Image (cartoon, grey):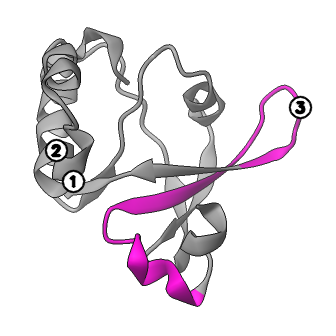
Amino acid sequence: MAFVLKSPLHWLVSFQLMLLVVIGRKTGRQFEIPVSFAKLDGVYVALTLKANQWWRNLRGSTCTAVIRGERVACTIDIIDSDVSSIEQNLRALINHNPLDARSEEHTSELQSPDHLV
């Protein structure tokens, strides 16, 4: 997917996916992570489960994002304890990308935002 998001064909998926380019905090290696996003009050938001490890590389760092085919420098704010903000961002993400609310099982799981960042 990273290849598509960096190519002229990005328009096929870039309406709902962006690519985060981050440097591993232990290895120093570059990682490219496609994530669903939504724009909320002029800010791009993306969510992941706390159990996923990749988001920890974002803490206290800057990264590059490929959004709709354009590379942009970005600043990262990790919100992992403000349940109200997480819920608001989750609702925005699902409204923008209804496919992210794949099934009743996942939807009920996502109604408890304490495991999201």
Q: Residues within 10 Å of mark 3 (few under 14, many from 20)?
A: few
Report the Cα–Cα distance between label 2 and label 3: 33 Å
In percent of width and height, residue 54 lies at: 62, 30
Direction from residue 70 to residue 44 in the image, left or right: left
> Quick check: 78 above or below 22?
above
Q: Nearer the viewer, mark 1 or mark 3?
A: 1
Residue occupied by mark 1:
97
Q: Nearer the viewer, mark 2 or mark 3?
A: 2
Q: Which amino acid type is shown beneath numbered disc 2? A: Ile
Report the Cα–Cα distance between label 1 and label 2: 5 Å
Residue occupied by mark 3:
27
Q: Nearer the viewer, residue 16 or 61?
A: 16
Mark 3 or mark 1, which is nearer the start of the sequence? 3
Report the Cα–Cα distance between label 1 and label 3: 33 Å
State which region is magenta.
8-31
In percent of width and height, residue 73 lies at: 56, 64
Q: Marks 2 and 1: in contact by CB < 8 Å?
A: yes
Residue occupied by mark 2:
94
Res 59 quadrant in image: top right
Label placed on residue 35: none
Res 38 quadrant in image: bottom left
